[in-house]
Image (cartoon, grey):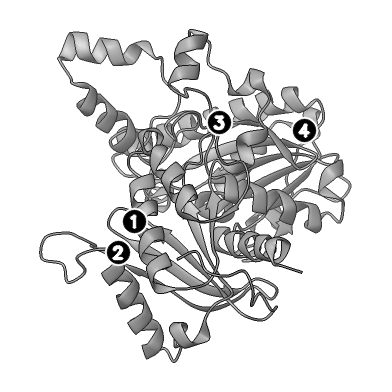
């Protein structure tokens, strides 16, 4: 059921769902006030010994948990259900109200995101069967649909790329969209006037260059493996590494894929991917942790410099997500020594811990350096609510 498009009164919550292959994250929140009424996660869906055999059962478990918190989500009837979908390919460049055709097209994109889109499809189908309200898909790749051809195109045979949809898509787009708008609010300037670089630094890391509110570059590519050093992902490596590992070590493509996605990055360099543990070990003089930190920062500075060159002028540099929001050491290391380019950090402001968006550059700095907490669930809820208002019959 796709549901009708009425009942979008402000004040009613939106239910935001993020369905993975074996998990269902949920949050019930009011877009206009940002008030979160409830949130949680159902795990081990379909795993041996689990009491949650599939996503329909997970929806039931979620509803029961909400009822225990005093929220009857069925009786409440949220104005919409917003679904996070990782990959929209070239098909979806904006949020879309879900119908059977949309589900079919998301399923067609599974080869581009085999670890993520299947869970999204099953979660959408389960939720549509339960909630007769509008359902909206918000795509991680959508914000980067505006990449110019020269940024999105790999230098491989054109026909091969077209036939198999091989291009740079980018990910974490919902976060980059939210943070770029929040940064504009922070500096009290229209987003259309600003050139921005956003650094989303968590277990997964990505950078973006944004001109006038539109993405013109991003570090992730056809898959989330490209770009920055991450918790367990290598980021950029010589493409010839794959052939070397196969030829010299006899590794299979599956083994190489696992190595670069799950056993590399900070974990590969330091043995752990928890950035707090790496910083603690640096304080203890651990050389491997220090090198992991240095490689991580080196790659970040590389991208910041490249994006400044692409933009021609930088107005705001924003740090977000777990590492970006909480590691003063990373922020100082990324910006340190870039005063000639208008970038600097006030040490006291940088050291101040806060859950609010804040400026950490000195007063009068040519480039504003900011810490802007991301909120992908709120962004999804707002986009879902806005789309429902646009499509509601007069």
- Of the two numbered discs 3 and 2 in the rendering, the one whose residue sits closer to the viewer: 2
Residue at figure coordinates x 27%, y 10% from the top left:
244
Q: Closer to the camera, 386 or 271?
A: 386
Q: Closer to the camera, 222 or 353?
A: 222
Q: Is residue 204 left or right of residue 321?
A: left
Question: Which residue, given by chain and number where applicable, does mark 4 sit on?
Answer: 339
Q: Is residue 186 left or right of residue 287?
A: right
- Of the two numbered discs 2 and 4 in the rendering, the one whose residue sits closer to the viewer: 2
Q: Residues within 10 Å of mark 3 (few under 14, many from 20)?
A: many
Q: Position of residue 303 (x, y in %)?
A: 61, 28
Q: In whole angstroms, how far apart are the C-alphas of marks 3 and 4? A: 24 Å
Question: Which residue, given by chain and number where applicable, does mark 2 sit on?
Answer: 55
Q: In whole angstroms, how far apart are the C-alphas of marks 2 and 4? A: 51 Å
Q: Position of residue 79 (x, y in %)?
A: 59, 74
In the picture as drawn, the residue positioned furthest to the bottom comes out as 70
Q: Is residue 386 above or below residue 311?
A: below
Question: Which residue, given by chain and number where applicable, does mark 1 sit on?
Answer: 122
Residue at figure coordinates x 35%, y 39% from the top left:
232
Q: Earlier in the sequence, mark 3 or mark 2?
A: 2
Q: Position of residue 116 (x, y in %)?
A: 37, 46
Secondary structure under tag 2 reads helix
Asked where in the image residue 302 lies, by quadrant, the reply is top right
Which disc is residue 369 wearing? none
Q: Closer to the camera, 156 or 328?
A: 156
Secondary structure under tag 3 reads loop
């Amino acid at each position: 059921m796709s549901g009708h498009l009425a009942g979008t009164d402000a004040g009613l919550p939106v239910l935001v769902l993020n369905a993975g292959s074996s998990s269902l994250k949920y949050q019930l929140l009011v877009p206009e006030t940002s008030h979160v009424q409830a949130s949680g996660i159902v795990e081990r869906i379909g795993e041996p010994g689990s009491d949650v055999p599939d996503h329909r059962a997970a929806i039931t478990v979620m509803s029961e948990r909400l009822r225990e918190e005093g929220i009857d989500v069925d009786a409440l009837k949220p104005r919409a259900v917003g679904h996070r979908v990782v990959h929209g390919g070239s098909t979806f460049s904006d949020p879309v109200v879900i119908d059977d055709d949309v589900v079919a097209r998301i399923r067609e994109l599974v080869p581009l995101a085999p670890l993520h889109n299947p869970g999204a499809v099953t979660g959408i189908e389960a939720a549509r069967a339960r909630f007769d309200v509008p359902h909206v898909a918000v795509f991680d790749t959508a914000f980067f649909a505006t990449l110019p051809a020269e940024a999105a195109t790999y230098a491989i045979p054109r026909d091969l790329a077209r036939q198999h949809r091989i291009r740079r898509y980018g990910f974490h787009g919902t976060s980059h969209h939210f943070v770029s708008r929040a940064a504009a609010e922070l500096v009290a300037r229209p987003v259309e006037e600003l050139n921005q670089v956003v650094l989303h630094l968590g277990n997964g890391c990505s950078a973006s260059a944004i001109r006038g509110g539109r993405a013109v570059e991003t570090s992730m590519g056809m898959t989330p493996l490209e770009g920055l050093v991450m918790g367990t992902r290598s980021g950029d490596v010589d493409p010839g590494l794959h052939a070397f590992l196969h030829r010299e070590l006899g590794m299979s493509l599956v083994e190489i894929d696992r190595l670069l996605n799950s056993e590399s990055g900070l974990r590969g360099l330091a043995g752990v991917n928890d950035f707090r543990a790496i910083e603690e070990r640096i304080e203890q003089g651990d050389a491997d942790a220090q090198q992991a930190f240095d490689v991580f920062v080196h790659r970040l500075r590389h991208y910041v410099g490249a994006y400044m060159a692409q933009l021609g002028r930088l107005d705001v540099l924003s740090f977000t997500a777990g590492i970006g929001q909480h590691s003063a050491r990373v922020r100082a290391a990324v910006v340190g020594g870039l005063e000639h380019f208008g970038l600097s950090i006030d040490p006291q402001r940088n050291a101040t811990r806060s859950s609010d968006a804040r400026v950490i550059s000195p007063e009068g700095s040519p480039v504003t350096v900011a810490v802007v907490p991301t909120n992908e669930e709120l962004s999804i809820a707002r986009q879902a609510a806005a789309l429902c208002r646009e499509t509601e019959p007069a």
